[in-house]
Image (cartoon, rainbow, N blue to C red):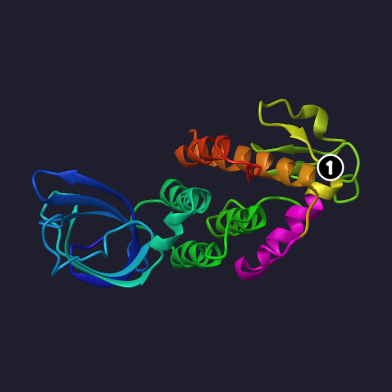
Amino acid sequence: MSGSSHTTDGVVLRATAVGESDLVVALFTRELGRVSAIARGARSSRRRFGGALGLLVHSELALGRRTRGSELWNLERATALDDHAALGGDPVVLGHASYGIELVREMTPAEVPEPAALDLLLGLWRALAPGPSPSLLRAFELALCERLGHGLSLDGCAGCGRSDELDAGAVFDPVRGGAVCRLCAPSCRGLGVRPLAATVRDYLRRAAATSLDDASALVVADDDRVAARDLMLAFVGHIVGKPLRSVAFVVQVHAGLTRPPT
């Protein structure tokens, strides 16, 4: 990646205070992908940054040349384009929005443009405005995984490719990448392997084929919703390779609420 200046749009994935007034920000940008930058005086300068470096804010970002030998860009200016900070008013919605941020941060490679992934994250934030939805999260997870080369095998066995042995005795194997037919299932022995009911597979297929704007309208039985959530968490956890902090946050929030975890 060259050290030339760029103006692009993007979001903040993480911000860390440095010194008395600076911030080091992890950014996910349309043209540069995931980069880190130092925003000098960001904690004291309203003119150059305003509220554009908050989480859940879509901003225009002016990135200056990097210092020779440094991985940090210089963030010279940021202007808010669309502010979704109101999502923070509901802790469950905030947890879901933060989950989207964490997936993008952990699943995208550094300095590789993934504009479709940015659009998915922004679409998730917009679709969360009416409230949380488990089907919305499933549609987002599936679409993001597909965009980043981790498409889930739901129409055929991830082991042999057959599609005619998935309705009875099938399992889900996160390591193999999806549904595994009853004939291949005995060879699946990982900790994340679990039974895959036909109704759960059908629900995930519908979620994968539905836009984020329409996903909240998907109807699913409670047991299938929970099963789909658990297997998707197993799948993205395998990809990321470590526990997701936002999931722990959502579980903690739900512990104090009456609505079931999503």
Element assignment for label 1:
loop
Residue 131, image x, y percentages: 57, 60
Res 213 quadrant in image: bottom right
Residue shown at 45% from the left, 59% from the top: 87
**In magenta stretch: residue 261:** no
Judge whether 253 appears above or below 91 on screen: above
Res 57 visible: yes
Residue 156 seen: no
Residue 193 at what x, y percent from top left? 71, 31
| 126 lies left or right of 202 | left
206 in magenta: yes
Residue occupied by mark 1: 197
Magenta region: which residues?
201-218
Q: Position of residue 220 (x, y in %)?
A: 78, 53
Prevailing SS of the magenta stretch? helix
Q: Is residue 69 left or right of residue 226?
A: left
Left or right: residue 28 versus residue 160 is left
Q: What amino acid is found at the position of numbered circle 1 in the picture?
A: Ala
At a point 64% along the width and 45% down the height, the residue shown is 259
Q: Quadrant of residue 228?
A: top right
* Residue beneath the point at 57% across and 65% down: 130
